[in-house]
Amino acid sequence: MSEFHYNPHISVDCVVFGFDDEKINILLIKRKQEGENVYALPGDLVQKGEDLDVAANRVLYELTSMENLYLEQFKTFGSPDRTSDPVDVEWIKSVREHPEARVITVAYNSLVKTQDFDYRPSSFAEEVLWHPIEKPQKLGFDHNEIANTGWAMLREKIKREPIIAFSLLPEKFTLRQLQTLYEALVGQKLDKRNFRKRMLRNRFLVAMNEKETGVSHKPAQYYRFDDAIYKEDFAKDQWFLF
Amino acid sequence: MSEFHYNPHISVDCVVFGFDDEKINILLIKRKQEGENVYALPGDLVQKGEDLDVAANRVLYELTSMENLYLEQFKTFGSPDRTSDPVDVEWIKSVREHPEARVITVAYNSLVKTQDFDYRPSSFAEEVLWHPIEKPQKLGFDHNEIANTGWAMLREKIKREPIIAFSLLPEKFTLRQLQTLYEALVGQKLDKRNFRKRMLRNRFLVAMNEKETGVSHKPAQYYRFDDAIYKEDFAKDQWFLF
DNA sequence: CCAAAAGTGTTAGCTATACACCCATGC
DNA sequence: GCATGGGTGTATAGCTAACACTTTTGG
């Protein structure tokens, strides 16, 4: 594949986190490379004249077939020696037209439900996988640094805008689901009664006329997230939980 | 000046805020350009193989002679049409070797005391000035967007790490000075008694054996910021004010 | 009837906010 | 002695955190 229409100096990398109703995972690819198993973040060069946000979506699509997720830029990594590991250097030589070029990379974050997206490796990705974030995994290039920074910044952001969390739940959800999600995000257990008290103060959380069925215990109330009420109450800045 | 050693696609822009003991200002340059007075952020292309953080410091130095300030990257701007205003296009043609190249720019933030730095225009800067942030000022390129984003992100950061604020005060300072600074940062007046109560809970704020002199009112107690106590008390995450 | 998760209230300590007067100094 | 900004306390309302038992369902 010719690369004449790529900007040899600028790449994007995508740090996609996925909630599987239990824990948070990170989306990785396995590179096609002789005799080595190298995991990395999905990322590649930007095209000439291509908007960065557009590039992030394209690159993720080309490698994983995932599309229509909300990617947000969080940091640009540009130290000249970010690609110095011999294994990485060899790989760059095999795929890049200007392997010697110094590349800065603009990193993007996303947070999705794993089950909302099908994925399938293509281009230089041999495999695509969701890797649990609690389990350490060595990545190529400086991708460990990028992924760790991305996770830290995403958590900071959720503290400021917890609304993000609701996008990870189904239309109707129970308070237990919401609490499990919050616990995965903050990385610690929370008190059930206090969690409910605080959460239910938020008017945008509305009880539905529906309960769980088919569970072998007291069925839980379903709630939904009301976007209109949310906007009304929090036009400006206010926040409760955290 | 030849540009063969510059990377034609990557630039840095510096959004430097300065506190003058009263209000917050932003550092601007006036470009040397025929018949137009164009204000802009200090910024320029990155050199080949140059670390981004290094480039930000170099560029700021070359344009303003300011050095040794702490610049922190906050966002990268890369829409293909960020430089479309005819006045900007003309200017680019006059100084760049590859005027047609699409440039993404990595933006850096800083927050300093205005009186700590001498400045003097050089390179393509005709003038360097501190501009009060309350007064709107049209800037070249997409620099208004960059400056506004930088200000918003700096304020967010100070909420999370208010320690930054102390770097803007002299070694010894009064609580009134501290309060004036906080009011400039949050953009609103605060209650004097409550401010003092909360602030003085912080052990790292230590009273000195010294008071103001030569003022025609009750002289104020001087305080200093104790870095060791700060680190001890807040090794992790805790914060009070805000 | 047993297991499993849902659902529910109270208390104590702390934090935020609102608010008004006396004090020390220079001129 | 007067103008100026420094410095101080209290009361109230709201929030956080800790903690244990009853309810509803399926099997």
Image (cartoon, coloured by chain):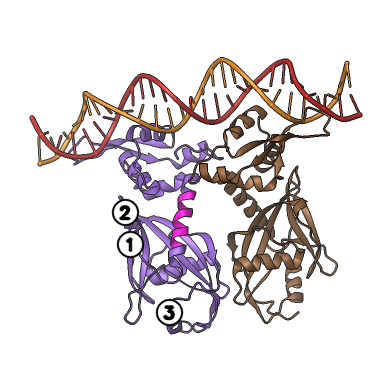
Chain colours: A purple, B brown, C red, D orange
Between the residue at mark 2 and the residue at mark 3, the CA separation in whole angstroms equals 35 Å
Magenta residues, dominant SS class: helix
Chain to which mark 2 belongs: A
Q: Quadrant of residue A140?
A: bottom left
What residue appears at the point 54 percent right and 46 percent down from the top-left corner?
Answer: B231
Q: Amino acid at mark 1?
A: Trp
Residue range highlighted in magenta:
A146-156
Determine which of the numbered discs, if any, sits on residue A130 in the image: 1
Q: Which residue is mark 3?
A: A86
Between the residue at mark 2 and the residue at mark 1, the CA separation in whole angstroms equals 10 Å
Q: Who comes first in sequence, dot 2 or dot 1?
A: 2
Q: Amino acid at mark 3?
A: Pro
Which corner quadrant holds the C terminus of chain B? top right
- Residue A98 position, x and y percent, is 52, 83
Within 10 Å of disc 1 (Cα), the crowding (few <14, some 14-19, many 20+) is some
**Same chain, marks 2 and 1?**
yes
Quick one: A24 or A166, which is closer to the camera?
A24
Chain to which mark 3 belongs: A
Q: Evaluate if marks 2 and 1 touch, with contact meaning CB atoms under 8 Å apart.
A: yes
Within 10 Å of disc 2 (Cα), the crowding (few <14, some 14-19, many 20+) is some
